Image (spheres, rainbow, N blue to C red):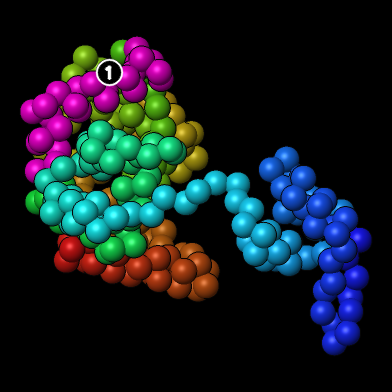
Amino acid sequence: MATVGKYGKIEFSEQDIQFIRENFQSMTNDQIASSLGLKKTRVRTLAYSMGLKRMDLEYWTSDQVDFLKQNYKSIGDVELAQIFENEWPKNKGWSKKHIEKKRRYLNLKRTKTELQKVHDRNKKSGRLAVANKKRWEFTGSNEIGTIVIWRVKDYPMAFIKTENGYVHYNRWLWKKEYGSIPEGYNVVKKSGCPEIPTIEFLELLTKDEHARRNQNKFLNLPADVKEIISLKNKLIKTIKKNENAT
């Protein structure tokens, strides 16, 4: 086992060196450090000085970086990874995460217009259709009539799948029971409404009535809760403003 020599210097015996050399590929640095009574960083430093490596790091070349900079605005990360795999194959292969990580490091962000171009390119090439097909083969598709709960603006809302896609469950249920919804009215939940509403917990309110009811609820909240809600709303507005700016 390694010992502490003069001035606190760690001294390794021949047995220590041999132990590290023989076990470096089969044991982790933590395990080796524990066996020798050392810190993991000390083992890592010694292994490096001995030329021991568990993998060869493959760094980006200037050609690869240039290609990424020239094409990331119009080509998606998945397609870029495939291009890199064909042009510059490496032992670990290329993945979407490799491209994303490098873009973040280089601060290569796509604007909304550029994202739309990538989307259109994928759609035109059939790449988007293939991705969706693979997704549904894996996850399956919900049957018509399935009710799901999605979070909208951090608020749980029920939706139901129809022949025309998913629609707001509250409005769908009201129309099913009472017919059309008058213009300018919202279908809103009453107090105590379950997560998946039943018709007795729904009512029609105008937008003004709905706003007043929400305002009254807000005013009746404790002061600290109101402050938290206000701060949250300000934060959401700031985030949206920054997203639109980019």
Asked if residue 202 lies left or right of residue 19, the reply is: left
Residue type at mark 1 is Lys
Q: What residue is rendered at 72% in x and 54% in y?
A: 29
Which quadrant of the figure has residue 246?
bottom left
How packed mark 1 is, by other alpha carbons closer than 10 Å (few <14, some 14-19, many 20 or more), is few
Which quadrant of the figure has residue 172?
top left
Q: Nearer the viewer, residue 42 or 199?
A: 42
Q: Is residue 172 visible?
A: no
Establish if 117 lies above or below 104.
Answer: above
Residue with the mark numbered 1: 133
4 in magenta: no
Q: Nearer the viewer, residue 108 or 35?
A: 35
Asked if residue 87 lies left or right of residue 151, the reply is: left
Q: What residue is rendered at 31% in x and 13% in y?
A: 144
Q: Is residue 127 visible?
A: yes
For the record, the magenta segment spans 116-143
Residue farthest to the front?
14
Asked if residue 103 lies left or right of residue 179, the reply is: right
Which quadrant of the figure has residue 78?
top left
**Position in image of residue 10 (x %, y %):** 83, 74
Asked if residue 161 lies left or right of residue 2, the reply is: left
